[in-house]
Amino acid sequence: MTDKFGFGIIGTGMAVEPHMLALQELGDQVAVRGVYTRSAQNREAFAKLSGFPAVSSLDQILNDQKIKAVLLLTPPNHRRELVAKLAGAGKHILMEKPVGRTLPEANELVSVCADAGVTLGIVFQHRFKTSSMAIKALIAKGTLGKLCSVALTVPLWRGQDYYDEPGRGTFARDGGGVMLTQAIHEMDLMLWLAGPVKSVQAMTGTTRHRMEAEDFVAAALAFENGALGSVMATVTAYPGYPERLMLTYEHATAHISQACLHIDWVDGRSFAPVGDATEPRHKWFKAQISEFVDAVRAARPPMANGDNALPVHRMISAIEQSSKSGRRIFSEPG
Protein backbone atom coordinates (compact mmCIF):
# COMPACT_ATOMS: atom_id res chain seq x y z
CA MET A 1 0.00 0.00 0.00
CA THR A 2 1.37 3.44 -0.92
CA ASP A 3 2.52 5.56 2.03
CA LYS A 4 0.61 8.72 2.71
CA PHE A 5 2.03 11.79 0.99
CA GLY A 6 3.51 14.18 3.54
CA PHE A 7 2.43 17.83 3.42
CA GLY A 8 3.46 20.91 5.33
CA ILE A 9 1.40 24.11 5.44
CA ILE A 10 2.90 27.59 5.65
CA GLY A 11 0.45 30.41 6.28
CA THR A 12 -3.07 30.26 7.71
CA GLY A 13 -4.72 33.28 6.08
CA MET A 14 -8.03 33.82 4.32
CA ALA A 15 -7.61 30.99 1.79
CA VAL A 16 -6.88 28.29 4.34
CA GLU A 17 -10.41 26.99 5.11
CA PRO A 18 -11.17 25.19 1.81
CA HIS A 19 -7.63 23.77 1.81
CA MET A 20 -8.15 22.50 5.35
CA LEU A 21 -11.45 20.81 4.45
CA ALA A 22 -9.92 19.31 1.32
CA LEU A 23 -6.91 17.91 3.20
CA GLN A 24 -9.12 16.49 5.92
CA GLU A 25 -11.15 14.60 3.30
CA LEU A 26 -7.93 13.40 1.66
CA GLY A 27 -6.70 11.92 4.91
CA ASP A 28 -6.45 8.45 3.39
CA GLN A 29 -3.96 9.78 0.80
CA VAL A 30 -2.06 12.61 2.50
CA ALA A 31 -0.73 13.40 5.95
CA VAL A 32 -0.29 16.98 7.12
CA ARG A 33 2.84 16.77 9.26
CA GLY A 34 3.29 20.41 10.22
CA VAL A 35 1.61 23.81 10.07
CA TYR A 36 3.73 26.93 10.47
CA THR A 37 2.90 30.60 10.59
CA ARG A 38 4.82 33.34 12.37
CA SER A 39 2.02 33.94 14.88
CA ALA A 40 2.10 31.25 17.57
CA GLN A 41 -1.47 32.14 18.51
CA ASN A 42 -2.72 31.70 14.93
CA ARG A 43 -0.96 28.40 14.32
CA GLU A 44 -2.14 26.91 17.62
CA ALA A 45 -5.70 28.04 16.93
CA PHE A 46 -5.56 26.51 13.45
CA ALA A 47 -4.05 23.29 14.82
CA LYS A 48 -6.92 23.00 17.28
CA LEU A 49 -9.49 23.67 14.55
CA SER A 50 -7.98 21.38 11.91
CA GLY A 51 -6.42 18.59 13.93
CA PHE A 52 -3.14 19.16 12.05
CA PRO A 53 0.04 19.50 14.15
CA ALA A 54 1.57 22.94 14.61
CA VAL A 55 5.34 23.43 14.46
CA SER A 56 7.23 26.32 16.01
CA SER A 57 9.77 26.98 13.25
CA LEU A 58 10.15 26.88 9.49
CA ASP A 59 13.20 24.65 9.92
CA GLN A 60 11.00 21.88 11.28
CA ILE A 61 9.22 21.76 7.93
CA LEU A 62 12.41 22.14 5.90
CA ASN A 63 14.16 19.33 7.81
CA ASP A 64 11.30 16.83 7.93
CA GLN A 65 12.19 14.29 5.27
CA LYS A 66 8.67 12.89 5.27
CA ILE A 67 7.26 16.23 4.13
CA LYS A 68 7.39 15.95 0.35
CA ALA A 69 5.47 19.13 -0.49
CA VAL A 70 4.38 22.37 1.13
CA LEU A 71 1.09 24.20 0.69
CA LEU A 72 2.18 27.86 0.63
CA LEU A 73 -0.64 30.22 1.67
CA THR A 74 1.22 33.39 2.67
CA PRO A 75 0.57 36.86 1.19
CA PRO A 76 2.54 37.45 -2.04
CA ASN A 77 5.15 39.71 -0.40
CA HIS A 78 6.48 36.78 1.69
CA ARG A 79 6.91 34.31 -1.17
CA ARG A 80 10.38 34.92 -2.63
CA GLU A 81 12.44 33.93 0.41
CA LEU A 82 10.14 31.05 1.29
CA VAL A 83 10.13 29.60 -2.24
CA ALA A 84 13.93 29.78 -2.36
CA LYS A 85 14.25 27.96 0.99
CA LEU A 86 11.66 25.31 0.15
CA ALA A 87 13.11 24.65 -3.30
CA GLY A 88 16.60 24.48 -1.81
CA ALA A 89 15.37 21.85 0.64
CA GLY A 90 13.86 19.81 -2.21
CA LYS A 91 10.25 20.44 -1.20
CA HIS A 92 7.63 20.50 -3.94
CA ILE A 93 5.35 23.54 -3.69
CA LEU A 94 1.63 24.04 -4.17
CA MET A 95 1.20 27.81 -3.90
CA GLU A 96 -1.82 30.08 -3.74
CA LYS A 97 -2.21 32.62 -6.53
CA PRO A 98 -0.73 34.92 -7.66
CA VAL A 99 2.64 33.46 -8.60
CA GLY A 100 4.25 36.85 -7.91
CA ARG A 101 3.39 40.49 -7.33
CA THR A 102 4.81 41.39 -10.74
CA LEU A 103 5.48 39.49 -13.95
CA PRO A 104 9.28 39.54 -13.39
CA GLU A 105 8.79 38.17 -9.87
CA ALA A 106 6.45 35.46 -11.16
CA ASN A 107 9.00 34.46 -13.80
CA GLU A 108 11.71 34.40 -11.13
CA LEU A 109 9.82 32.08 -8.79
CA VAL A 110 8.97 29.66 -11.60
CA SER A 111 12.65 29.59 -12.59
CA VAL A 112 13.81 29.01 -9.00
CA CYS A 113 11.66 25.90 -8.76
CA ALA A 114 12.67 24.65 -12.22
CA ASP A 115 16.38 25.11 -11.43
CA ALA A 116 15.96 23.20 -8.16
CA GLY A 117 14.06 20.39 -9.88
CA VAL A 118 10.99 20.71 -7.67
CA THR A 119 7.38 20.70 -8.84
CA LEU A 120 5.52 24.01 -8.61
CA GLY A 121 1.74 23.95 -8.61
CA ILE A 122 -0.42 27.08 -8.53
CA VAL A 123 -3.83 27.05 -6.87
CA PHE A 124 -6.22 27.77 -9.73
CA GLN A 125 -9.06 25.65 -8.42
CA HIS A 126 -11.57 26.94 -10.99
CA ARG A 127 -9.88 24.72 -13.57
CA PHE A 128 -11.04 21.75 -11.49
CA LYS A 129 -14.75 22.54 -11.48
CA THR A 130 -16.94 19.92 -13.14
CA SER A 131 -18.14 22.56 -15.59
CA SER A 132 -14.60 23.63 -16.51
CA MET A 133 -13.44 20.07 -17.10
CA ALA A 134 -16.50 19.35 -19.24
CA ILE A 135 -15.96 22.24 -21.66
CA LYS A 136 -12.20 21.59 -21.74
CA ALA A 137 -12.96 18.08 -23.00
CA LEU A 138 -15.32 19.41 -25.69
CA ILE A 139 -12.68 21.92 -26.83
CA ALA A 140 -10.07 19.17 -27.05
CA LYS A 141 -12.38 17.10 -29.26
CA GLY A 142 -13.03 20.04 -31.59
CA THR A 143 -16.77 19.58 -31.14
CA LEU A 144 -17.49 23.28 -30.75
CA GLY A 145 -15.59 24.41 -33.82
CA LYS A 146 -13.56 27.59 -34.18
CA LEU A 147 -13.51 30.05 -31.28
CA CYS A 148 -14.93 33.40 -32.37
CA SER A 149 -15.24 35.60 -29.27
CA VAL A 150 -14.89 35.64 -25.50
CA ALA A 151 -16.57 37.77 -22.83
CA LEU A 152 -15.69 37.64 -19.12
CA THR A 153 -17.48 39.66 -16.44
CA VAL A 154 -16.50 39.55 -12.77
CA PRO A 155 -18.87 41.89 -10.86
CA LEU A 156 -17.81 41.46 -7.22
CA TRP A 157 -18.17 43.50 -4.04
CA ARG A 158 -15.70 44.33 -1.30
CA GLY A 159 -16.50 46.97 1.31
CA GLN A 160 -14.05 49.59 2.48
CA ASP A 161 -13.42 47.63 5.67
CA TYR A 162 -11.83 44.92 3.53
CA TYR A 163 -9.22 47.40 2.27
CA ASP A 164 -8.72 49.01 5.66
CA GLU A 165 -6.70 45.95 6.70
CA PRO A 166 -3.01 47.01 6.59
CA GLY A 167 -1.39 46.08 3.28
CA ARG A 168 -4.51 44.94 1.48
CA GLY A 169 -4.91 46.42 -1.99
CA THR A 170 -1.30 47.68 -2.01
CA PHE A 171 1.38 46.93 -4.58
CA ALA A 172 3.94 46.18 -1.86
CA ARG A 173 1.95 43.32 -0.28
CA ASP A 174 -0.56 42.11 -2.88
CA GLY A 175 0.96 43.34 -6.14
CA GLY A 176 -2.31 44.93 -7.25
CA GLY A 177 -6.06 45.10 -6.75
CA VAL A 178 -9.02 43.34 -8.29
CA MET A 179 -7.00 41.65 -11.04
CA LEU A 180 -4.33 39.87 -8.97
CA THR A 181 -6.42 39.32 -5.86
CA GLN A 182 -9.93 38.44 -7.08
CA ALA A 183 -10.41 38.20 -10.85
CA ILE A 184 -7.19 36.27 -11.54
CA HIS A 185 -9.08 32.99 -11.06
CA GLU A 186 -11.63 33.73 -13.77
CA MET A 187 -8.98 35.32 -16.00
CA ASP A 188 -6.85 32.19 -15.71
CA LEU A 189 -9.83 29.97 -16.51
CA MET A 190 -10.59 32.12 -19.57
CA LEU A 191 -7.03 31.69 -20.89
CA TRP A 192 -6.93 27.98 -20.00
CA LEU A 193 -9.98 27.48 -22.22
CA ALA A 194 -9.49 30.14 -24.92
CA GLY A 195 -5.71 30.25 -25.24
CA PRO A 196 -3.23 33.09 -24.66
CA VAL A 197 -3.84 36.74 -25.43
CA LYS A 198 -1.77 38.49 -28.10
CA SER A 199 -2.64 42.11 -27.29
CA VAL A 200 -4.82 44.26 -25.04
CA GLN A 201 -6.31 47.75 -24.96
CA ALA A 202 -7.37 48.57 -21.41
CA MET A 203 -8.46 51.01 -18.74
CA THR A 204 -8.08 50.49 -14.99
CA GLY A 205 -8.86 52.76 -12.08
CA THR A 206 -9.74 53.17 -8.43
CA THR A 207 -13.34 54.30 -8.61
CA ARG A 208 -14.82 53.83 -5.15
CA HIS A 209 -12.42 52.56 -2.52
CA ARG A 210 -9.62 54.17 -0.56
CA MET A 211 -6.86 51.87 -1.79
CA GLU A 212 -3.62 52.09 -3.76
CA ALA A 213 -4.38 49.57 -6.51
CA GLU A 214 -7.29 49.27 -8.97
CA ASP A 215 -10.85 48.33 -8.06
CA PHE A 216 -12.05 48.28 -11.70
CA VAL A 217 -10.67 47.05 -15.01
CA ALA A 218 -12.06 46.87 -18.54
CA ALA A 219 -10.05 45.55 -21.47
CA ALA A 220 -10.46 44.55 -25.10
CA LEU A 221 -8.51 41.42 -25.98
CA ALA A 222 -7.06 39.90 -29.13
CA PHE A 223 -6.25 36.21 -28.73
CA GLU A 224 -3.39 34.45 -30.49
CA ASN A 225 -5.89 32.12 -32.21
CA GLY A 226 -7.66 35.08 -33.86
CA ALA A 227 -10.63 35.37 -31.49
CA LEU A 228 -11.56 38.73 -29.98
CA GLY A 229 -12.77 39.29 -26.46
CA SER A 230 -13.40 41.49 -23.49
CA VAL A 231 -12.96 41.40 -19.74
CA MET A 232 -14.57 43.54 -17.03
CA ALA A 233 -13.80 43.03 -13.36
CA THR A 234 -14.70 45.11 -10.35
CA VAL A 235 -15.10 44.94 -6.59
CA THR A 236 -17.57 47.84 -6.58
CA ALA A 237 -20.74 45.95 -7.63
CA TYR A 238 -22.75 45.78 -4.40
CA PRO A 239 -23.80 43.24 -3.20
CA GLY A 240 -21.75 41.14 -5.64
CA TYR A 241 -23.00 39.11 -8.59
CA PRO A 242 -22.01 35.80 -10.23
CA GLU A 243 -19.02 35.76 -12.54
CA ARG A 244 -19.83 34.82 -16.12
CA LEU A 245 -17.57 33.52 -18.88
CA MET A 246 -19.10 33.31 -22.36
CA LEU A 247 -17.30 31.72 -25.30
CA THR A 248 -18.85 31.81 -28.76
CA TYR A 249 -17.79 29.11 -31.19
CA GLU A 250 -18.57 28.23 -34.78
CA HIS A 251 -21.16 25.64 -33.70
CA ALA A 252 -22.33 26.82 -30.28
CA THR A 253 -22.21 29.38 -27.51
CA ALA A 254 -20.97 28.17 -24.14
CA HIS A 255 -21.18 30.03 -20.88
CA ILE A 256 -20.12 29.23 -17.34
CA SER A 257 -21.70 30.91 -14.35
CA GLN A 258 -22.10 29.79 -10.74
CA ALA A 259 -20.09 26.64 -11.52
CA CYS A 260 -22.58 25.55 -14.20
CA LEU A 261 -21.87 25.08 -17.91
CA HIS A 262 -24.63 25.82 -20.41
CA ILE A 263 -24.28 25.31 -24.17
CA ASP A 264 -26.64 26.54 -26.89
CA TRP A 265 -25.99 24.75 -30.18
CA VAL A 266 -26.52 26.61 -33.45
CA ASP A 267 -28.40 23.60 -34.90
CA GLY A 268 -30.85 23.58 -31.98
CA ARG A 269 -29.52 20.52 -30.15
CA SER A 270 -30.20 20.40 -26.43
CA PHE A 271 -27.45 20.17 -23.85
CA ALA A 272 -28.01 19.21 -20.24
CA PRO A 273 -26.26 21.76 -17.98
CA VAL A 274 -23.11 20.46 -16.28
CA GLY A 275 -22.17 21.46 -12.76
CA ASP A 276 -23.96 22.55 -9.64
CA ALA A 277 -24.22 26.04 -8.16
CA THR A 278 -24.43 24.49 -4.69
CA GLU A 279 -21.29 22.37 -5.16
CA PRO A 280 -19.08 22.85 -2.07
CA ARG A 281 -16.10 25.05 -2.89
CA HIS A 282 -13.55 22.85 -1.18
CA LYS A 283 -14.36 20.06 -3.66
CA TRP A 284 -12.35 21.93 -6.33
CA PHE A 285 -9.40 22.34 -3.93
CA LYS A 286 -9.60 18.66 -3.09
CA ALA A 287 -9.45 17.74 -6.77
CA GLN A 288 -6.46 20.01 -7.32
CA ILE A 289 -4.50 18.75 -4.31
CA SER A 290 -5.15 15.14 -5.30
CA GLU A 291 -4.03 15.80 -8.88
CA PHE A 292 -0.91 17.61 -7.62
CA VAL A 293 0.06 14.64 -5.46
CA ASP A 294 -0.43 12.28 -8.42
CA ALA A 295 1.74 14.57 -10.58
CA VAL A 296 4.58 14.64 -8.05
CA ARG A 297 4.51 10.88 -7.68
CA ALA A 298 4.50 10.42 -11.46
CA ALA A 299 7.22 13.07 -11.98
CA ARG A 300 5.03 15.03 -14.41
CA PRO A 301 3.82 18.65 -14.39
CA PRO A 302 0.53 19.17 -12.54
CA MET A 303 -2.45 20.48 -14.48
CA ALA A 304 -2.01 23.95 -12.95
CA ASN A 305 1.71 24.58 -12.81
CA GLY A 306 4.15 27.48 -12.77
CA ASP A 307 4.67 27.58 -16.52
CA ASN A 308 1.00 27.53 -17.51
CA ALA A 309 0.11 30.00 -14.77
CA LEU A 310 2.29 32.68 -16.37
CA PRO A 311 -0.04 33.61 -19.29
CA VAL A 312 -2.50 35.27 -16.91
CA HIS A 313 0.35 37.26 -15.37
CA ARG A 314 1.46 38.34 -18.83
CA MET A 315 -2.05 39.48 -19.64
CA ILE A 316 -2.43 41.40 -16.38
CA SER A 317 0.93 43.08 -16.93
CA ALA A 318 -0.13 44.09 -20.45
CA ILE A 319 -3.45 45.45 -19.13
CA GLU A 320 -1.59 47.57 -16.56
CA GLN A 321 0.79 48.89 -19.22
CA SER A 322 -2.06 49.66 -21.61
CA SER A 323 -4.00 51.56 -18.97
CA LYS A 324 -0.98 53.66 -18.03
CA SER A 325 0.04 54.43 -21.62
CA GLY A 326 -3.37 54.62 -23.30
CA ARG A 327 -1.99 52.36 -26.03
CA ARG A 328 -2.55 48.85 -27.29
CA ILE A 329 0.03 46.59 -25.68
CA PHE A 330 1.27 43.28 -27.00
CA SER A 331 1.58 40.62 -24.34
CA GLU A 332 5.05 39.32 -23.58
CA PRO A 333 5.51 36.00 -25.42
CA GLY A 334 5.76 32.80 -23.43
Image (cartoon, rainbow, N blue to C red):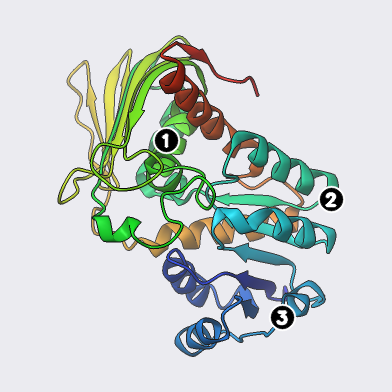
Q: Residues within 10 Å of mark 3 (few under 14, many from 20)?
A: some
Q: Which residue is mark 3?
A: 57
Q: CA distance from mark 3 to mark 1?
A: 36 Å
**In the shown orientation, is residue 225 left or right of residue 215?**
right
User: Callout 1 environment at 10 Å: few (<14), some (14 to 19), or many (20+)?
Assistant: many
Residue 233, quarter of the rendered image: top left
Q: Amino acid at mark 2?
A: Ala
Numbered disc 3: secondary structure: loop
Of the numbered discs 1 and 2, the one sitting upstream in the chain is 2
User: In this rendering, is residue 323 above or below 180?
Assistant: above
Can residue 119 be seen at all in this image of the molecule? yes
Q: Nearer the viewer, residue 92 or 154?
A: 154
Q: Tell me what residue is drawn at x 61 percent, y 20 percent.
A: 332
Q: Quadrant of the N terminus?
A: bottom right
The answer to which of marks 3 and 2 sits earlier in the sequence is 3
Query: Element under label 2?
Result: helix
The amino acid type found where label 3 is placed reads Ser
Q: Is residue 88 left or right of residue 263?
A: right
Residue 141 in sight: no
The residue type indicated by label 1 comes to Met
Q: Is residue 250 left or right of residue 48?
A: left
Tell me the residue that label 2 is attached to.
116
- How far apart are the two marked residues, 1 and 2, measured between alpha carbons? 29 Å
Residue receiving disc 1 = 187
Above or below 175: residue 18: below
CA–CA distance between discs 3 and 2? 23 Å
Compared to residue 288, the image places residue 112 above or below, namely above
Figure quadrant of residue 57: bottom right
Q: Position of residue 290 (x, y in %)?
A: 57, 61
Image location of residue 219, percent across then percent down = 35, 22
Asked whether the residues under the numbered discs 3 and 1 touch, taking CB atoms below 8 Å apart as contact, a structural biologist would say no
Point out the frontmost of discs 3 and 1: 3
